[in-house]
Image (cartoon, helix red, strand yellow):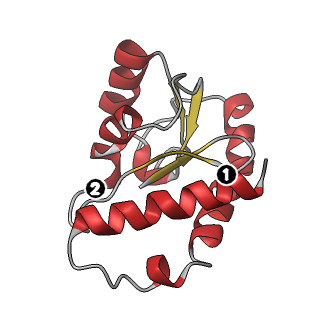
Amino acid sequence: MAIADSHGLPVAVGVTSASPNESTLVEDTLQRRHVEALPERLIGDRAYDSDGLDERLQQNHGVELIAPNRCNRRRTQDGRSLRRYRRRWKVERLFAWLKNYRRISSRWERHARNFLGMVQLGCVLILLRHL
């Protein structure tokens, strides 16, 4: 899981197994951020649409979560904040940049700690390229 800023540069990364839902990993990834300041808003896809996650992020961290509503839920966000959702392609651009590194695109590392180190090294290279 990765969190990117408004330019698509990495702010936080985390590596876990494939089984847990991403919405349960948001707070843990926020704790592992590379920068000191917390983001004001997080943009996620429909999987992040959860009242519990909204409340926890707002109360504990002061972060507004922007995610489109799932089809089986009532509307909880107005159209103004959802217009920011169109900028989610910048986060996807970060994943495309990380896939340029062969060690990350095909996970050769057996242990999660080693793979996290490779992902962090890829993030450092991306940040250095954009200085």
Residue drawn at x 29%, y 79% as measured from the top left: 109
Report the front residue among 11 and 45.
Answer: 11
Query: Taking 69 as reference, is 96 left or right?
Result: right
Q: Secondary structure at mark 2?
A: loop
Quick check: can you spot residue 72? no
Image location (x, y in percent) of residue 48: 42, 45
Residue drawn at x 59%, y 23% as measured from the top left: 40
Query: Taking 125 as reference, is 57 left or right?
Result: left
Image location (x, y in percent) of residue 9: 66, 49
Instruction: Identify the residue position indicated by label 1 in the image.
Output: 127
| Residue 97: quadrant of the picture | bottom right
Residue drawn at x 46%, y 57% as measured from the top left: 120
User: From what the image shows, is residue 101 above or below residue 67?
Assistant: below
| Amino acid type at mark 2 | Asn
**1 and 2 marks in contact (CB < 8 Å):** no
Instruction: Identify the residue position indicated by label 2 in the image.
Output: 21
Q: Residues within 10 Å of mark 1 (few under 14, many from 20)?
A: few
Q: Nearer the viewer, mark 1 or mark 2?
A: 1
User: From what the image shows, is residue 38 above or below residue 95?
Assistant: above
Image location (x, y in percent) of residue 113: 25, 61
Quick check: can you spot residue 31? yes
